Image (cartoon, grey):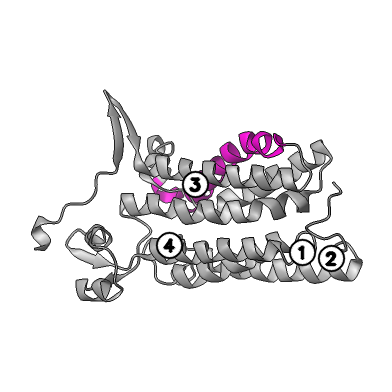
Amino acid sequence: MEESIKPLDPVFLQLGPIQIHWYGVIIGLGALLGLWIAVRESERRGLHKDTFVDLVLFAIPMAILGARAYYVIFQWDYYSQNPGDIIKIWNGGLAIHGGLIAAFITGAVFARVKNISFWKLADIAAPSIILGQAIGRWGNFMNQEAHGGPVTREFLEGLFLPEFIVNQMYINGQYYHPTFLYESLWSIVGFIGLLLLRKANFRRGELFLTYVIWYSIGRYFVEGLRTDSLMLTESLRIAQVISIVLVLVAVGVIIYRRMKGYSNVRYLDTDQ
């Protein structure tokens, strides 16, 4: 049976010599859906409807550059010998943490220039970011990457997965953990949770920081299953270290802002 299994075509559309890959299409879809949600919410929160459109024009290119630069830096042994592959992002190799760092910096600069509360923007954007991550992981699925260690077909079928997922996890003669799926489902639960927490009228900034904590906890455990992790040392996974640091920083920021009275404004307040 395994001999007849063929992977899904990673190419969405072929236009002569130009290939449009599912990886880019799926990431683009996640970004557009996230933008739509953020625009609708920003209008309800008293911001101009074009605020997030303007932000995304800067944030998405910077996030892609940051995600790629982060990945290339930690794989420099390979890319220093193959510099032509650095631009081939359609083959994968976008590190989420690098993208988040770049987007965070871009958002902070944008908020300062526009004289808008950064934490207000971040809170509005949080559900959109984690939804984009949930959708984007399916780009990894199409590329048969970001998977975990070896498992059996019986294990995958025991998870009650659709056959197309089980078959796509058959790579070079071996079945693997669908860690892309684990992270995607964790992120979807986080997305739903953040939407519900909006109604709790959290203190400003804490919705975004809750996203950071939730995503980082899930990423820490999923990363432990992956076989393609970026490594700091032979036994230390970079994403796990970053996840721990982000949880500690987010908790620390929440405590600090409360102690200093910086978070007295609530999410549903309409001031800038």
Mark 1 falls on what kind of element? loop
The residue that mark 2 highlights is: 257
Q: Please tell me which of labels 3 and 1 falls first in the chain.
A: 3
- Most frequent secondary structure within the magenta stretch: helix
Are the two marked residues, 3 and 2, in contact with CB atoms closer than 8 angstroms? no
Q: What stretch is highlighted in magenta?
A: 49-78
Q: Is residue 239 magenta?
A: no
Q: Residue 80 carries which label?
A: none
Foreground mark, 3 or 1, reads 1
Furthest-right residue in view? 261
Foreground mark, 3 or 2, reads 3
Q: Residue drawn at (16%, 62%), measured in percent from left and top?
A: 173
Q: In this view, does 213 lie above or below 55?
A: below
Mark 2, residues whose alpha carbon is within 10 Å: few (<14), some, or many (≥20)?
some
The amino acid sitting under disc 2 is Arg
Mark 4, residues whose alpha carbon is within 10 Å: few (<14), some, or many (≥20)?
some
The residue that mark 3 highlights is: 30
The residue that mark 4 highlights is: 229
Q: Residue drawn at (39%, 34%), measured in percent from left and top?
A: 84
The residue that mark 1 highlights is: 201
Nearer-the-camera pick, 166 or 246? 166
Nearer-the-camera pick, 191 or 182? 191
Q: Please tell me which of labels 1 and 2 falls first in the chain.
A: 1
User: Residue 52: x percent and y percent?
Assistant: 67, 39
Mark 4 falls on what kind of element? loop
Q: Please tell me which of labels 2 and 4 falls first in the chain.
A: 4
User: Residue 224: x percent and y percent?
Assistant: 44, 72
Foreground mark, 4 or 1, reads 1
Estimate the spatial distance between the alpha carbons at disc 1 and disc 2, rounded to whole Å: 16 Å
Q: Can residue 232 be seen in this view?
A: no
